[in-house]
Amino acid sequence: MLEGKIALVTGGTRGIGLATARALAEAGATVVLTGRDEAKAKEAAAAAGAADGLALDVTDAKAVSTLVRGVAKEHGKLDIVVANAGIMEDALLGMIREELVDTTLSTNVAGTLHTVQAAARAMMRKKTGAIVVLASIVGEHGSAGQTVYAASKAAVANIARSAAKELGRSGIRVNAVAPGVIDTDLTSGLSEDAKAENIGKTPLGRLGTPEDVANAIRFLVSDDASFITGQVLGIDGGLVL
Ligand code: NAD
């Protein structure tokens, strides 16, 4: 399905990013994944069947640009980029610290923006490519105690919608996935009661797995999705917040 494609996945050392790197590699793509720590990135790449694992902090615009350009140069092109790296920290309105605002926006919003910009530059030459960014169900509907995270993910969804409008004539598709509650390290802090409450509000009656999200991303970056762009696809078991 993805034979001959060159793919890059940010934040690929665990969770959804790792499952996505594995899904793309299993579909035949040559995958490069990134993590903040180089040793962990190499380890994850080996586990996922990816070609390489590189160190990258997505908040560093110059580092993102250099890495993306380097991957495209080494492999002769870049077909697929998944801007997955992200963080989530909960805080009620009265408890929001400035540092939380800075780290969340610089990672989730600026980090995604840097990745999409660099991907677009690399893909522009061949006038083809597919980009997926990681939004969230809370970015679409809001969530008590998650105002900063929800705002950041609403921004991510609109990076996809806007970039899709700009890049369509260059043959580059940009979509977002908006996962519900997925069982990863990011959500491991949820209490059993909170998990049970979410499951109760989910028609499919379970939490999502990283593979549920990875499979949808694999579809969106494939040629089967060749007329799909600017969409925010919920992967949430029907969860109503
Ligand atoms: P995770 O915490 O397991 O993985 C996140 C990855 O991003 C890690 O590899 C981490 O090292 C990396 N990362 C964080 N900051 C980074 C930075 N500055 N530079 C480079 N890499 C960085 O989380 P996950 O659940 O796999 O989430 C992946 C994405 O999906 C995130 O963007 C998250 O917001 C989004 N998402 C997750 C859920 C969920 O329920 N798990 C729901 C909706 C959206």
Image: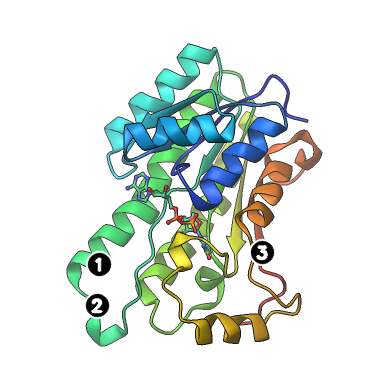
Which residue is pictured at 47% across the width and 13% down the height?
Answer: 74
Q: How many marks?
A: 3
Which quadrant holds the C terminus?
bottom right
Q: Which residue is mark 3?
A: 234
> Alpha carbon of mark 2 to alpha carbon of mark 1: how far?
7 Å
Label 2 vs 3, first from the N-terminus: 2
The three-letter code of the residue at mark 2 reads Ile
Note whether residue 162 is visible. Answer: no
Could you tell me which residue is drawn at 39 percent across and 29 percent down? 54
Distance in Å between CA atoms under marks 1 and 3 = 26 Å
Q: Which mark is residue 182?
A: none
Question: In terms of image quarters, where does ligand 1 lie?
Answer: bottom left
**Cα–Cα gap, marks 2 and 3:** 27 Å
Instruction: Spot the residue most to the left.
Output: 98
Per the image, the residue denoted by label 2 is 96
Q: Is residue 13 left or right of residue 220?
A: left
Q: Position of residue 191 (x, y in %)?
A: 46, 81
Kind of residue at disc 1: Leu
Mark 2, residues whose alpha carbon is within 10 Å: few (<14), some, or many (≥20)? some
